[in-house]
Amino acid sequence: MRRPIAVASRHSRRLLVSGVLLASQSLLPVLSAAPASGDGTGGAPVRGTAHMGMGVLAHEGVQGRPADTRTTQTEGVDVSSHQGNVAWPTLWSSGVKWAYVKATEGTSYRNPYHAQQYGGSYDVGMIRGAYHFAIPDGAGGAAQADYFVDHGGGWSKDGRTLPGVLDIEYNPYGDTCYGRTASQMVGWIRDFLDRYRERTGRHAVIYTSTNWWKQCTGDYSGFGAANPLWVARYASTVGPLPAGWDQHTMWQYTSSGPTVGDHNKFNGALDRVEELANG
């Protein structure tokens, strides 16, 4: 009686081991297909996920809500892949009249929702444009301007297309100033702006925060005469501006809009937005 039991026991062990191996092998595709968080550096953002105000919110926070003002302003929104397909009719009905859509980042990333966002805002009647998230420790400024223009950042004089925006702000992937000195940063920005002007005939808008600009460009004042300023500050007022500008064109006042995206105020009535579009 004992021998048959022993044979059965060895057989059971073989079945058990085989079952474990099969189960382990069946798990491999699942484990390898699981999405990775971050880029493998301890939770750092994945390249391409940066968007307007991402660094501003992280470094400067929310300092208050915008105060009521008698100055005429026009509501706008900016979106990226984070918003996915946007309900543009809802935004239009809420009073949003202009929009900026992320087109590119560096020289390798393109917003997969650009077509729906860029075309959808236009279709409901908005005046819209595109922005580029700068990566100054990557390719040069001129190369990134070319990539931007070639992939959704161009301009046409149709009265409904705003000039492109250079989003230059806190580095979400590493060193705040991208490892560049103030003079190197200014040179990089100038290269981008010059190439964009060469390619489109328009001066690009500069999006930044005053604190970052002071820290990373040494509060350079040489772009204010030609390039409109879009300032980011989540507070009751716009606050001090970077050197070279005595007024702002746009103000990103919140990173949590009532409908979707970051919300902004254009410093003027709708006809001023149209003037910027027309150049």
Image (cartoon, grey):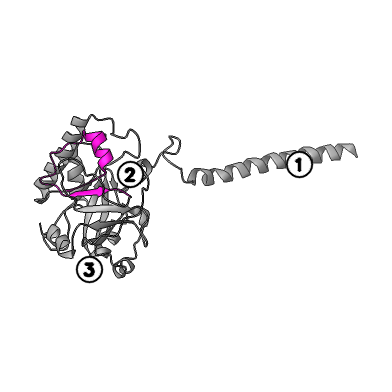
Q: Residue at x 37, y 45 (%)?
A: 61
Q: Earlier in the sequence, mark 3 or mark 2?
A: 2
Q: Is residue 190 visible?
A: yes
Give the amino acid type for the residue marked by disc 1 in the picture: Ser
* Residue labelled with disc 2: 56
- Confirm or deny contact between disc 3 and disc 1 (CB under 8 A): no
Residue at mark 3 to residue at mark 1: CA–CA distance = 72 Å
Q: Position of residue 86 (x, y in %)?
A: 34, 62
Mark carried by residue 57? none
Residue at mark 1 to residue at mark 2: CA–CA distance = 62 Å
* Residue labelled with disc 1: 12
Q: Secondary structure at mark 1?
A: helix
Q: Earlier in the sequence, mark 1 or mark 2?
A: 1
- Residue at the farthest right position: 1
Q: Is residue 205 above or below residue 72?
A: above
Q: Secondary structure at mark 3?
A: loop
Q: Earlier in the sequence, mark 3 or mark 1?
A: 1
Q: Position of residue 121 (x, y in %)?
A: 26, 64
Q: Secondary structure at mark 2?
A: helix
Q: Is residue 152 visible?
A: no
State yes or no: residue 58 in magenta: no
Mark carried by residue 125? 3
Q: Position of residue 245 (x, y in %)?
A: 16, 45
The magenta-colored residue range is 205-234
User: Which sits in the foreground, 268 or 163?
Assistant: 268
Q: Residue at x 43, y 41 (%)?
A: 38
User: Which sits in the foreground, 75 or 71?
Assistant: 71
Q: Position of residue 74 (x, y in %)?
A: 23, 62
Q: Is residue 195 above or below residue 92?
A: above
